[in-house]
Image (cartoon, grey):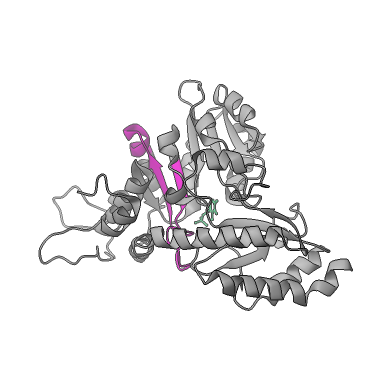
Amino acid sequence: MTDNLSTDTFVVNAGRSRIAGQPLNPPPVPASNFYLPHDRLYARSHGTETSDALEELIGGLDRGRSLVFSSGMAAAGVVLNRLPVGATLAIPTDPYHGVDGIASEGETLGRWNLLRLDLADTQAWIDAAATADLLWLESPANPLIDVADLPAICGAPRKPGTIVAVDSTFATPICQTPLDLGADVVMHSATKFLGGHSDLLAGSVTVAEDTLYDEFRERRMLNGATIGALEAFLTIRGIRTLGVRMERAQHNAQILAERLADHVEISIVRYPGIASHPTHEVAASFMTGFGAMMSFDTTGPGERANAVCRATRVVHHATSLGGVETTMERRANITGQETMPPTLIRMSVGIEDVEDLWSDLTQALESTVGMSHS
Ligand SMILES: *Cc1c(COP(=O)(O)O)cnc(C)c1O
């Protein structure tokens, strides 16, 4: 019934029962166990009606079978921890810090060999496909917003059994569908754009293949990484508007990136939608949108970037991303990110009126201009 629908229609319609007398929206089901005999025994193993509906939505968007989790890291963890002892794991040089934490710990414990590859170095990833057991890509990536050449890497010849996984959190299924490009696994932190309102933690893993699906489902049960009923309900509610939210947020991001790139108080803007971005052409070759994440550097010392973040009145000074509200932060303040350029501000662009955002950013830059030459 929901096959062949455009994404905007699918997100509104999927995951509903269409049974007379039943509610249009799958209700939050706060249950741990169910009357027997039935296939659904226990929520940690078998989920609930609410998580089923959410999996139908995310699976349809990603074009595979989806499993939802209590957070993005819970989802990432089942994929990474699947690696057998002695395996080789390839990750980007600067992956999401939680992923870095699991990968580095595994390396320290001698569980696996770790390759750290530059996301923009496509050949290095193609070479790794022939030797590594798991390629963990994140694209666009945090916080330099580099885009990996997913068609080339996901389509590269592989050693038998090698899995290619893509953390597609920044892109969402609106901007890319890695399974269509040959990836085996696509992971989202649904905490971000899928949920879209900064009011929940959730994650997902979508796979094309049934054996991986069964394996990840088993691991989710063993880890107890199952999503809660309210979170599943809220994530569904968020996804209903994913199409319109992403359309507006990307529109705003493109305009802000272009204007910031021309602003004298900004030294560099990183957004895949502008021609000066090192991976603009790669992104334009396969993505269906450039997303709503960007980063930029203010002129002057790092303290000026902090002052800009504190001087906004519309944009929220906060970490995380993907909400309806625009947020920004100086990344080097984050533990583990101290090596970032000291003046780098990462911004998650929301759905506000772009002119209000622009006035706010320019007033924050102007009010701190005295620090720019200190
Ligand atoms: C937030 C995030 C995660 C982790 O997700 P949580 O829901 O916070 O556990 C993983 N990858 C990326 C790119 C993220 O932004």
Q: Is any part of residue 135 visible from this angle? A: yes
When the figure is inspected, residue 67 is found, relative to residue 85, above or below; the finding is below
User: Which image quarter holds the C terminus?
Assistant: bottom right
Q: Residue at x 47, y 31 (%)?
A: 163
Percent across and percent down for residue 158 are 50, 22
- Front residue of 8/336: it is 8
Q: Residue at x 50, y 62 (%)?
A: 249
Residue 147 picture quarter:
top right
**Image location (x, y in percent) of residue 279:** 63, 42
Relative to the observer, which residue lies in front, 228 or 150?
Answer: 150
Vertical placement of 291 versus 197: above or below? above
State the image coordinates of residue 30 (x, y, percent, origin top left): 29, 65
Quarter residue 337 falls in: bottom right
Q: Is residue 185 left or right of residue 118?
A: left
The range drawn in magenta is: 186-215
Asked if the stretch drawn in magenta spans residue 269, the answer is: no
Nearer to us in this view, 74 or 138:
138
> Would residue 43 be seen by someone viewing this image from the given angle?
no
